[in-house]
Image (cartoon, rainbow, N blue to C red):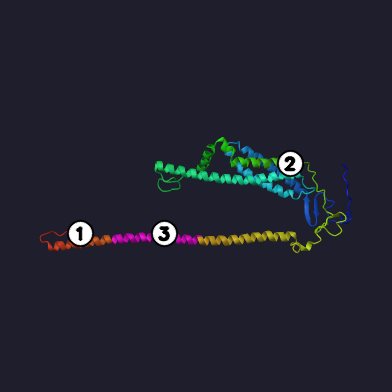
Amino acid sequence: MATDITTIDWTDHQNDTSSSLYSPDYTYSNDKYSCIRGFYFAHLVFNYLVFLSGIVCLATRVAPPRYKWLHSWFGRVYVLSMLWSTVTSLLMNNTGLPLSTIISFGAVMGGLTVGWIVIVVYRSGMDRKAQQLVQERSLVEKTKLGTPPIGDTTDGGQEDLDLTKMLNDAKMDIVNSKTFVQRFFSLKALHGILFFTSWMQITGRIFASNQSGDFTCHTYPVYKPIDAPQVPEGAEDELTIVPTTDPDYDRLPWAAAGPVAWTMQIILGSMFGAIVVGGLVSWRASVKAQRISGESRNSSRADSSEVMDEEDVLATKDKDVRSSRRATVGMTNDHVPNVEKFSDEEEE
């Protein structure tokens, strides 16, 4: 089926040295970039990082336990690579995306989002169960042997405890106690299914896409012949190429300072504001902590003083009792004849 081609007058771009109409390396119209050839290669690199990190994540599930820690780290590489792959794809626009690719990308981002939330919930629950199990085992051990609880560093306490190993052992015991049904219908299994589905969409596109390196920015936008506020007058009757510069550039917030200077002001201003607010919050928190610490010390001193006062009262009472006894004995000796007086040393 033949396709009709509508010719457009682009003579106004022929003498415009700033126009990207004849450049295969980038597309720039209305003071905006829609395609930069270099971003294609960056996009390719990040997609391969997605592909390779996904393979490592799959391999670590069947690897020996000492390599299990690699799963979470390469999972982070997978997520970050996916983010940068998405960013670089924004400047690869030529003719848009087919519907199948849009649906596939929905599976990519959907699996990534839900799968990440699922594993966060799973790990939180696993940490809570492991901590509870370690605490229960500690109490049982204490009851059996009469040893101080975990964390007690007094004489006879357990000073050299590897809490990380105890928690990991508890987690392994929890996992090993699960049945097939509990393993298959679990949040961890759902996480694996969703991330594998997400990974497969990228893997399929890598091997189905043209990787010869001949990518070019080969299209240029034109105004649609429609009645819309963004379409200039006269463009409704014939196709009109979008100009290189924005006719209403002065309305833009960066018109005065320029896009680079304006953007750097926003970035540096945000950083400075965060530093100032962070400093104030940190100062307020430190002052509050010092006040609480001072109140705690004063309370401890008051408690010690009260204990000492109680001891002094008891000592005074004891002294009064002893003095009274001595006086009584002295009076008795004075009134009883031929009776030897008791000395303080003998009474004591």
Badge 2 vs badge 3, beta-carbon distance below 8 Å: no
Callout 1, which amino acid?
Answer: Asp
Mark 3 — residue? 300
Residue 280, magenta (yes or no)? no
Residue 299, magenta (yes or no)? yes
Mark 1 — residue? 344
Q: Is the magenta stretch mostly helix, strand or loop?
A: helix
Looking at the rendering, in which quadrant would you find the C terminus? bottom left
Q: Where is residue 128 in the image (x, y as percent from the top left)?
A: 52, 46
Callout 3, which amino acid?
Answer: Ser
Q: Which of marks 1 and 2 is in front?
A: 2
Q: What element carries label 3?
A: helix
Earlier residue among tags 2 and 3: 2
Q: Position of residue 295 (x, y in %)?
A: 45, 61
The residue at the point 55 percent across, 61 percent down is 283
Callout 2, which amino acid?
Answer: Arg
